Amino acid sequence: MDPAAPDPWLGQTLGGYSLVALLGRGGMGAAYRAERAGVAAVVKVLAPEAAEIPLLRKRFQREGQALQRLPAHPHLVRVLEVGEADPPWIAMELVAGGALTQQLARGALDPAFAAHLGRDVSLGLAALHSQGLVHRDIKPDNLLLDALGRAKIVDLGIAKDAMASGLTAPGQLLGTLTYMAPEQWENGPLGPATDLFALGATLYHLVCARPPFLGSDMGAIADAATHGDFPPPRELVPGLPGPLADAIEQLLAPDPCQRYASAESLAADLEGILRGEPASVPALSDPRAPSRRFSLLGVRRASIGSGPGNEVRLPGASARHARLARKERGLVLTNLRGSAGTWVDGEPLSKPVVLSEGARLRFGEAELVFSDPQRRELPPPFLRDLRREPRPEPTLAALVATRDPRAVVSLLERLAPPPSWELVAGELAPLGLGAELLGEVARGRRVLAE
């Protein structure tokens, strides 16, 4: 739209909402302050040029409908109504407070306040994700403070219904550059972990007064994000509490499986951090002195021993005792030849082993406990293959299009028979089966069982 041209909708009425003031304009449309029956609201109107494109129009309408189904939540801006006539529009509650960008204009936020806001946003994301939706554009400008000082997620119009993944064209970037996850840059499947990465980038910005990924062009920013190349937050803010810095760095892991397991687990961790507890990150700790802790956050390879140069310096062990390496399956422990022996859960280590949560390790006379509370199990192989595709394969896409619960159930039970069904259901949402269709699948399974 020509900026000099008169606004075609200002002063008009859509669905009983009088559009009284322009709040902002973007490539997809404009947002207006509106009133209906004396109640203020925000109405987002799809741009005329976008409304002429069936793909964009359909996505706007479907996403509005999905958002309208969301239960009321204190950390989500509520969608009030969706209009499908010309022009398509979405009415949302008006939040009086400003965006977090206004707070950042005054400098970095207090770490405790930032952690509090992060917990709020995590709870809002948990509600969004529970409905099969992914926001895809979490950033300071899309987080508002209400009159009670609570953070609310706004600009839900970009949120993606996982069931309608085909409504996003291949190669289309949805998100704001300095907060985008590697899978967004690589046109990979998006899921809840995508929003957690963006929240990590936002928290980094809140406490460091700059985004984690900077560059002279899109390519440089993309390269930094995909390789996890950012200054550690404690280098920029020496007084930053270690647990909060650990949580932020875990959120910014390039591999989605190495981030927090869910928005709920992040919210719980931030609550613990506010109470002075450590972050739930991979670590080795001394059971006799819990404060003696070796963080394994971001570790790709680390040596364990008593000699200098070891990442885990351990009196009582051999000079070069064992090695840790991150593999697709998790952290693998290998005993080094010539050491005084390594034991895992009371058994001598004769070959490399993937460490499990709570494993008790002994290196000569030294003992440690391994912890990785956020670790997620890998999905079944056929789902890992699908995750590598930017879009579901044609067979799966055709199956989704039929919306036939019996057909979906039949295929799922062949590919992943119980008891792996729960894992499969959780993994299918980012692949193209959202909450609505998964509900149909569940109903179909009950019918078949009767």
Image (cartoon, rainbow, N blue to C red):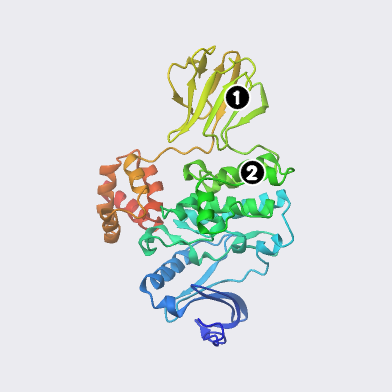
Task: Identify the residue position indicated by label 2 in the image.
Answer: 232
- Depth check: 167 or 42 in front? 167
Q: Secondary structure at mark 1?
A: loop
- Depth check: 131 or 5 in front? 5
Residue 242 relative to residue 372: left or right: right
* Disc marking residue 310: 1
Q: In the picture, residue 60 is in which quadrant?
A: bottom left
Can the viewer see residue 148?
no
Residue 406 relative to residue 180: left or right: left
Expressed as whole percent of the image width and height from the top left, the position of residue 160 reads 45, 61
Q: Amino acid at mark 2?
A: Pro
Can the viewer see residue 352?
yes
- Depth check: 430 or 47 in front? 47
For image coordinates 26% across by 58% down, the residue present is: 398
Image position of 69 with respect to 405: above or below: below
Expressed as whole percent of the image width and height from the top left, the position of residue 363 reads 56, 17
Image position of 251 with respect to 96: above or below: above
Image position of 45 with respect to 359: above or below: below
Image position of 442 with respect to 335: above or below: below
Q: Amino acid at mark 1?
A: Asn
Query: Badge 1, how many Cα within 10 Å: few under 14, some, many 20+?
Result: some
Question: CA gap, disc 2 to disc 1?
Answer: 21 Å
Q: In the picture, residue 297 is in which quadrant?
A: top right
Expressed as whole percent of the image width and height from the top left, the position of residue 2 reads 52, 83
